[in-house]
Amino acid sequence: MVKQLSPTALYDLPSGNRVHPCRLIHRDGTIMWRHALISPYNELFLPETEAHEAHIIKTAARLEELNCWASQGLEPWDCIIPVMWYIPVHQHMPFSEGYACTFKHASIDIKNVLEKISPHIQEFESLSHADGNLYFQRC
């Protein structure tokens, strides 16, 4: 039996990489490409430039680090879940370039997640509560 993915199931990124939507952005992480590239309205937005792709990858790395603080002692599926991330047509530049993300946690309320990860936010980053989710932005 041949186990191959259809080429139409893969996303072509500006860097030349082809990724499956369920592929983790970082091998040891929990965030998949679909989390970054599919909007809350089920629209697919592929990165328009290599810079946008790099912003998404760096933001995913920071979200994974923050997830370690938020989810200590929990099962791997009890983690940060991105809600809205890369939308190139969005008026808010951090969303349109991929360096901002709204997220929630699978099992912990927003207030507790905010308390756990706030001390780990770096000086060039921001974290706030927005519309029932957390808003994270890096520069």
Image (spheres, rainbow, N blue to C red):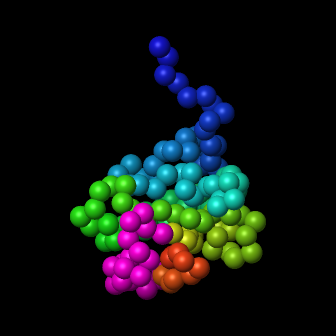
What's the residue at 69%, 59% (across, down)? 41
Left/right of residue 123 with respect to residue 5 in the rendered view: left
Quarter of the C terminus within the rendering: bottom right
The total number of labels drawn is: 0
Residue placed most toward the observer, 33 or 72: 72
- The residue lying furthest to the top in this view is 1
Q: Is residue 8 magenta?
A: no
Q: Is residue 112 magenta?
A: yes
What's the residue at 64%, 61% (across, down)? 40
What's the residue at 51%, 69% (across, down)? 103
What's the residue at 43%, 85% (across, down)? 123
Quarter residue 12 falls in: top right
For the record, the magenta segment spans 104-126
Give percent across and percent down for residue 131.
59, 79
Left/right of residue 69 with respect to residue 12 in the rendered view: left
Whether residue 122 is visible, yes or no, is no
Give percent across and percent down for residue 28.
35, 52
Give percent across and percent down for residue 64.
39, 63
Give percent across and percent down for residue 102.
55, 71
Whether residue 57 is visible, yes or no, is yes
